[in-house]
Amino acid sequence: MGERLLMKGAEALAEAAIRAGAQIFFGYPITPQNESPEYFSRRMPEVGRTYVQAESEVAAINMVYGAASTGTRVITTSSSPGISLMQEGFSYIGNSNVPCVIVNVMRGGPGLGNIAPAQADYFQATKGGGHGDYHSIVLAPHTLQEECDLMYDAFELAEKYRIMVVMLSDGLLGQMMEPVEFKDWVDVSKLKTPDWAIVGKGDRPRNLVSSFDLSPEGLEKMNLDLQEKYKKIQENEVRYELYKMDDAEYVLTGFGTVARIMKTTVNMLREKGIKAGLIRPITVWPFPYKVFEDFADKAKFFLDVEMNEGQMLEDVKLGVNGKKPVQFYGRFGGIVPTAEEIYKAFKLHMGGC
Amino acid sequence: MKLIYKAPDSFAKKQTTYCPGCPHGVAHRIVAELLEELDLVKKAVIVWPVGCSVFGYDFIDTDATVAAHGRACAMATGIKRAHPESFVLTYQGDGDLASIGMTETVHAAARGELITTIFINNGNFGMTGGQMAPTTLVGQVTTTSPYGRKPEVNGFPIHVSEMLATLDGPAYIARASLDSPQHINQAKNFIRKAFKAQILGLGYSLVELVSTCPTNWKMTPVEALERVRREVLPVFPIGEFRVVKGVE
């Protein structure tokens, strides 16, 4: 590990991305993540790399699509309404099999909403968002350190599977300050142009990066190939953290910011002699269904907490598969629940069980 | 016997998929000829559009991609900025470039992106069945202007070349026509200058090619060419609108 620095989240993730080998950034300002493009705009030229401010999120994602088609490590950062504008590009990137990293610092919605932290883009991130049957790998860090560490994995996973990787952050992680320790720099001079990239054909047969096939048979084949890839990812890349789950009778679950708060709730419950634990999905696509299935036999009930109306709840229920009650507590509009509030919600549901 | 004229090696050895009388084939051939003459085939990446020429990569043998409708200049920006050694072209129709993709086009031009755009202006949305485009002439009947384009309902045609020529970013902006051998030769000269603008790193370049769409215009190919001379060129005059020092 390298330097330990006290940094703001949006800046720390930008620094991590640069150290992880981001060669080019395209983006458009939107609160609460403006510190990321601002940081990239200063830092990328310093390290001999490229920063371009696009005229819109629509243009930004298509610039990302172009750069990704050349096999270059490319990243953009945005926040919920901006991410909505990028969905067209995500869908094209999905079916073109090009790698890139997208950061969504989620804020309150729908519509213009507000600039406070929220987690209401879970459906959009994990179920597609744009048109067609596609998926992206979606990582949901709960601390700045984890976000910085995962940035390295994000680029590697993107390249390994030729897929878009989404870092599902939120306004709290974007705006808070925390000490972070950065991993070693990736030596970008050693990154090779992949053999599928479009950079000029030279002496090889030409390459084509495309998301379309007008023949139904051809397009079905493209879809089947995508599904095959997604199956491999589901088999190999599921990540989660188990917190005090060894003897847990009550399972709390949440992702990102909320899960971090829920660790405190688990500790509060443990102090009262209640055997609570936390399952924290780190990949929310692919979702760790199996671990919920495994604990469904042992646990008395599950409590899912999110800063939305219960979007991950559907996946939790799929994992638990009706074996035990799954309760939900959520806050909207940029309100971050406290550990005490979650404790109260737990006690309420405990009484009902 | 001395060979004085042949098909470019990088150009299709098969029939194109365009309608009879469509000038896409002519425009493709000019592009392929110039890529060879300027030794750019191995460096070229062409961003093909959504529209009739979506299959352009089947006819010109270079690395290629197909952008979302209107997004070619943004995608080309990404390619060129990520890999400046590539020679990057976008090939776009008037619906693609001047309607849904106007923002991406204007800003790529304003940034002076080192890319070149071949802009086919045939006054309608060809592939989707001949709907009104931003370049449709006043009075012109299309499937979505069945009573003829009326300014009070649909506004006026957009003069893309003239508009882009007001920006500081472009190095070369010109409009040519594909209605006659003489004009086709001129078009090739204009496109050569546009390529040169990119090669020399002078800025964005675009050549608008006034074309026909006999199928959707419901005319024979010859009638369509006559209409270009009679009705279109008076509204969209050919010529060079911006030539920075070094291109000429």
Image (cartoon, coloured by chain):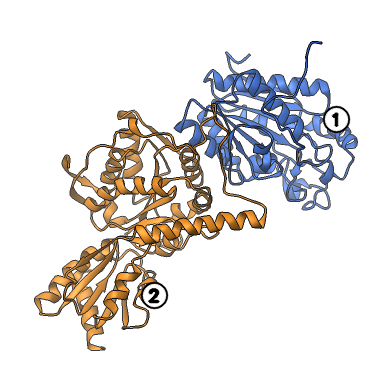
Chain colours: A orange, B blue
The image quarter containing residue B180 is top right
Tell me the quarter of the image containing the N terminus of chain B: top right
The residue that label 1 is drawn on is B229
Q: Residue at x 67, y 23 (%)?
A: B191
Q: Residue at x 52, y 35 (%)?
A: A198
Task: Indicate the secondary structure of the residue bearing disc 1.
Answer: helix
The image quarter containing residue B58 is top right
The image quarter containing residue A298 is bottom left
Q: Nearer the viewer, mark 1 or mark 2?
A: 2
Looking at the rendered structure, which numbered label has been put on residue A318?
2
Tell me the quarter of the image containing the C terminus of chain B: top right
Residue kind at label 1, given as amino acid type: Arg
Q: Is residue A287 left or right of residue B7?
A: left
Find residue A79 and report its horizontal and vertical position in percent. Answer: 39, 53
The number of numbered badges drawn on the structure is 2
- Disc 2: which chain? A
Are discs 1 and 2 less than 8 Å apart at CB?
A: no
Find residue B211 and report its horizontal and vertical position in percent. Answer: 77, 34
User: B138 or A315: which is nearer to us?
Assistant: A315
Q: Is residue B6 left or right of residue B83?
A: right
Find residue A280 and report its horizontal and vertical position in percent. Answer: 26, 65
